[in-house]
Amino acid sequence: MNLDDLKTSWKSIDEKATATQKLSEQMVLSMIKENSKSTVSRIQNKLKKVAFYFAGLFVLFIAILAGNPFDYSNWYEYVPAVAYAFLIVAVLEIVIREIIAIGKIRLTKSNLHESLEKIIQLHETYQSVMETVWKISMIIGFLLGTSLLVRNFETYGWTKSILVIAANAITVIVLYLIAKIVFKQLPDTNLDELKMNLNELSE
Amino acid sequence: MEKEFIILLNQNRTILYKICRVYCKETDDRKDLFQEIVFQLWRAYPSFKEEANISTWMYRIGMNTAISNFRKEKRRQAPVAFSTMKSALPELADTENNAIETTTLYQAIDLLTQIEKALVLLYLEDKSYEEMAEILGISKSNVGVKLSRIKTKLEKIIKSFTV
């Protein structure tokens, strides 16, 4: 059996496919409605969830600043919460810009090479946004802990205060490192596969 | 526009069936991919008139979707009406109903990489190097080099089946 024989058998597949029933209008319209599976849509949906989460966090910090539930008595105790609010606004802006940029991309106009490049770029941008979000969340955690301890610093004295801040920082760093190790064990196989395909195409 | 699109889709549905068969082994995955390609074609339909060749347009979008835009995910719970619709899609070329040559061809193609599958599919469809280059976004000479390598690989795979 050689490739020419196979080409002949391929033609028989063509005939078989032609003999299949036609797609009804209702069937096609249902397919068009089921559109949330594409990579681009999935990235957009994930980003929308991130934006929603940070919008909620923003409301929370505004409420903290307005209601003072932690009984802050000095102006500098408010600094972390104000800083968080600004950071959240910055993240929200990045995420919303990303959602708009992704929405403008039309993969259907590209050839395979361009398409793969665009998808890889989307994935990488998304990952970099998520990494920034992750780091910001860690810093937020550290600052929040510190702001709650500030009022006790006078009672603690210098040495104990520094030790408490250091312990807080070490906890956050350890958590960050554990998370980094865990995420390294779960690589994005889709992205690797897409890069492999692009390399193969470019070779 | 909807009716025009459906007529066009029906006239060229064999292209979609073949892409789905080459890229997905499982029937359910094939149906999911088919559906995703139809959606992508619909999205691209308003700009279709700029294209000269319908089959080149369909292959380009179909392959883009199969390789770069379609990934297996946990299958969502589909509504009953939709499941019924999905089962109405043709069970194209299931191996048990095929001739030995066809089964061998599919088994051999399954062993190729995503990009090699794309080139083999276009080769089997008698596409010119120019069309292949346009669909894949690579040069004509690159198509020639790759295709010759893939043919050798495919022949080796087929020989290993027959030994």
Image (cartoon, coloured by chain):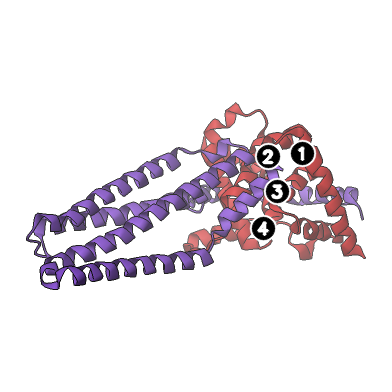
Chain colours: A purple, B red
Q: Is residue A163 visible?
A: yes
Give the residue at mark 2. B136
**Dots 2, 1 in contact, CB < 8 A:** yes
Q: In the rendered structure, which amino acid carries the disc numbered 4?
A: Cys
* Distance CA(mark 2)–CA(mark 4): 19 Å
Q: Is residue B71 visible?
A: no
- The residue lying furthest to the front in this view is A159
User: The disc numbered 4 marks a residue on which chain?
Assistant: B
Q: Secondary structure at mark 4?
A: loop
Residue A88 spot, x, y in % from top left: 27, 51
Tag nearer the camera, 4 or 1: 1
* Distance CA(mark 2)–CA(mark 1): 9 Å
Q: In the rendered structure, which amino acid carries the disc numbered 3?
A: Ile
Residue B141 is left or right of residue A78, and the answer is: right
Give the residue at mark 3. B115
* Distance CA(mark 4)–CA(mark 1): 23 Å
| Of the image marks 3 and 1, the number of the one nearer the N terminus | 3
User: The disc numbered 3 marks a residue on which chain?
Assistant: B
